[in-house]
Amino acid sequence: FLKNDEKSILIFTGEGSKILNKNSIYLKEEFNIFDEMNFFEESSEQICSSALKFSNSQNFEEVEIIPKKSKKSGFFEKLFYFFK
């Protein structure tokens, strides 16, 4: 799901981030792909307020949903995948 050569940041938000000490979390080797860990001690109200502001904004270009195109397969393709 994440590639090792890409930079990535793990972010903890809300009141749950308060129970984690910045030096007390260690990830397994398979999850050792995060370059940085950030802790934001926001309240639930602040998080919900930010989400509401984002959903009310007209800037939805950050995520673009592309519908999946269905490919019609022929007789031999169906036969091949049947015996695969």
Image (cartoon, grey):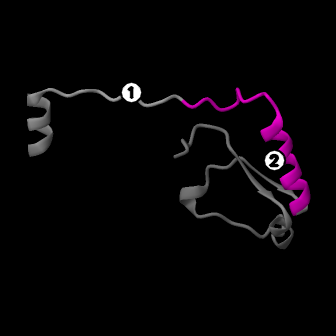
Image quarter hosting the C terminus: top left
Q: Circle 2 sits in a helix, a strand or a loop, which is it?
A: helix
Estimate the x, y position of residue 61 in percent, counting from the top left. Answer: 70, 26
Indicate yes or no whether the magenta region holds residue 20: no
| Of residues 4 and 78, the one drawn nearer to the viewer in this rendering | 78
Estimate the x, y position of residue 37 in percent, counting from the top left. Answer: 77, 53
Q: Residue, x 86% and y 41% (percent of image)? A: 53
| Of residues 44 and 4, the one drawn nearer to the viewer in this rendering | 44
Residue 69 - label: 1
Span of residues in magenta: 44-65
Q: Residue, x 14% and y 26% (percent of image)? A: 74
Indicate yes or no whether the magenta region holds residue 51: yes
**52 sits to left or right of 2:** right
Estimate the x, y position of residue 15 in percent, counting from the top left. Answer: 85, 67
Count every numbered label the image shows and give the total. Answer: 2
**58 sits to left or right of 31:** right
**8 sits to left or right of 45:** left
Estimate the spatial distance between the alpha carbons at disc 1 and disc 2, rounded to whole Å: 31 Å
Q: Is residue 42 visible?
A: no
Q: Quadrant of residue 17?
A: bottom right
Q: Is residue 70 above or below residue 41?
A: above
Q: Residue, x 51% and y 46% (percent of image)? A: 1
Residue for badge 2: 51
**34 sits to left or right of 12:** left
Residue furthest to the bottom? 19
Q: Amino acid at mark 2?
A: Ala
Q: Amino acid at mark 1?
A: Lys
